[in-house]
Image (spheres, helix red, strand yellow):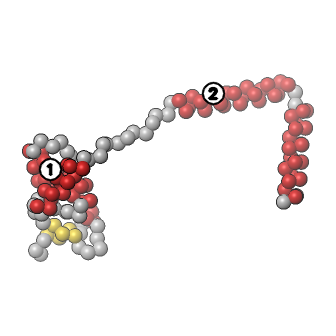
Amino acid sequence: MLVRLLYLITMRIFAWLVLLSRSSAAKDAEILILRHEVAVLRREKKWTQPPSAGHPPVPVELRELIIRLGTENPRWGFRRVHGELRRLGHKVSQATVRRVLRAGDLVGAGYRIRAGRSPGSGSAVRAGS
């Protein structure tokens, strides 16, 4: 600990001695370079764009309606649920309907998932087979 402290003090003293031995032109050049670096960093900071917020979340009422349609009609797929929602006047994409149904563990269209596999791994099997 004491050796480290002595080393740091010695390094500071030598750095000051180097600064004292420099000419004023060298010091001015260093200051000019440092000011330029600061100006470049400030310019880069100004031009960064804030991250996009993404899509707004699905309203709770619409999410519950999607889950209810999927539960009451287990043989409907996400496309059919999407069509019914559009017919009722709700503007929602097929991907959103599919995501909400998967989040609610409703695969739809009479499919069930084999144990231990994810829905996207090609493991869906027709119900009744």
Left or right of 73: which side holds 4?
Answer: right
Q: Sequence order check: which comes first, mark 1 or mark 2?
A: 2
Between marks 1 and 2, how big is the CA–CA gap?
A: 53 Å
Looking at the picture, tell me which residue is in the foreground, 67 or 39. 67
Tag on residue 122? Answer: none
Q: Residue at x 72, y 29 (%)?
A: 33
Q: Residue at x 35, y 42 (%)?
A: 54
Q: Is the residue 79 above or below the residue 51 in the image?
A: below
Q: Which residue is mark 1?
A: 82
Callout 2 secondary element: helix
**Image coords of residue 65 (percent x, y):** 16, 52
Q: Residue at x 20, y 49 (%)?
A: 61
Q: Quadrant of the N terminus?
A: bottom right
Callout 1 secondary element: helix
How many numbered markers are drawn? Answer: 2
User: What residue type is disc 2 on?
Assistant: Ala
Q: Does residue 104 appear anywhere in the picture?
A: yes
Q: Which residue is mark 2?
A: 39
Left or right of 83: which side holds 3?
Answer: right
Q: Is the residue 91 above or below the residue 1 in the image?
A: above
User: What residue type is disc 1 on?
Assistant: His
